[in-house]
Image: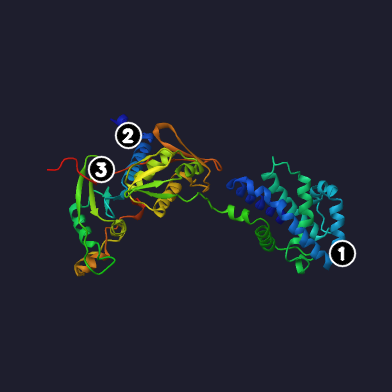
Amino acid sequence: MSIENLKTFDPFADVEEDSGRSNAKTENYIHIRIQQRNGRKTLTTVQGLPAKYDQKKILKRMKGLYGLVETDCWTACNGNIVKDEEMGEVIQLQGDQRKDVHDFLTKRPPTKAEAETMTEKDKAKYGLGIKAATVKVHGF
Amino acid sequence: MADVEQKQRKSVAFSEGSVIMDTNGQVTEAPPADQPADKEVDEVTDMFKGLAKKKKSKKSKDADADAEEAPAGDAEFDPSVLKKKKKSSKTKKLDTGDFEAKLAEAGVSEEAAEETAEEVIPEGDPEAGTGIWSHDATQTIPYSLLVSRFFSLIQSHHPDLLSSGSKSYKIPPPQCLREGNRRTVFANIADICKRMKRSDDHVMQFLFAELGTSGSVDGSRRLVIKGRFVQRQIESVLRSYIVEYVTCKTCRSPDTELNKGENRLYFITCNSCGSRRSVAAIKTGFRGQVGRRKRTG
């Protein structure tokens, strides 16, 4: 018993675990990509959102959010969730929403007090509070 | 003296850095080109002070002897020797350092270089003959003044040295042509890849992954990309490619090599500082379905 306990103190095991953790971290990038469709139309994909967020809720917020940030009118884009074997769940949005998605992901979330008092329009001020370093925006 | 030593080392290192950054061709030509202009300046200033001229001409006459003696004299420097002598030897050393670094194989003899430095540089500086810079001033010159003088000199004589010392790295702008309605031709990809020392395939892979599209190479090695893109867009993608896969993160030098190391990882090896880092493989990521579906209904 004691010998087995000693084995768990193997210094190399710790290192391996550390490297494994860092690997997992690099895997956790959120990629925002853009694709050209026919004509001037584009498609924005958001890949690698952390599992702790409910994709459907995020999508709903994103759909409603655009247009509110920059302008005053609601010109929401549409979007849907695609399930991919390799990449997991991916959010697809119509149009070039890279900047707005990035803003939404990196803005700080509302505190509890703010959440109680905020109006529908104030929602645009708050985001998910993800670190900007983990969000990678691709494309031109 | 310690000050002088320090400055020498500093300036030489600076020039070396710039040499590494630059392609040698233009820089090597610069010093001879400067020479005539400075001689003109010499003559003008000579008209105003005869004394200096005498001294000068004497110096240039036995420049050969001076050239060999100067380093020794510099080493056993005694304070009674004129300030000018000190200055000139310093600048001369600097110049020879430049030359040694750059013109080792260019065939310019060291003596010639020293000679020009000897007679050109002290007369050429704008502060000549006033205050602390005067011909026979004996007070020590503060380090900050020397540094500012050094930079003003190098700016007026070798402007390209200063500019290349910074991180300017130039590649030709990408040439984008529209082919038909929905395809873009990236014409000079071969040239750009050659400048960056990267394989066409790697750059292509990156472009396609970033632009979220696909394409092909045509007969004259031009890249045909599906989708409409303008030069600015391609340029920004190339910029990110250079940041990611070309420049050395340690010394910012673009003189690097990309090769496959063990474990299917790609490594960038810097040729100027020797650092080695791994870079991420190019991943296309998720691609949404665009265009026509395979089977409808």
Say whether residue B237 is left or right of residue B276.
Answer: left
Residue A1 at x, y percent in the picture: 28, 30
Q: Amino acid at mark 2?
A: Thr
Q: Are marks 2 and 3 in contact (CB under 8 Å)?
A: no
Q: Which residue is mark 3?
A: A87
Q: Is residue B293 above or below residue A61?
A: above
Amino acid at pointer 3: Met
Q: Which mark is residue A8?
A: 2
Q: Secondary structure at mark 2?
A: loop
- Identify the residue shown where x is 30% and y is 43%: B285
Q: Residue furthest front?
A: B180
Write down the chain letter for disc 1: B
Q: Position of residue B245 (x, y in %)?
A: 44, 44
Mark 1, residue position: B51
Q: Is residue B14 above or below residue B282?
A: below
Sequence-earlier tag: 2 or 3: 2
Q: Residue at x 21, y 45 (%)?
A: B292
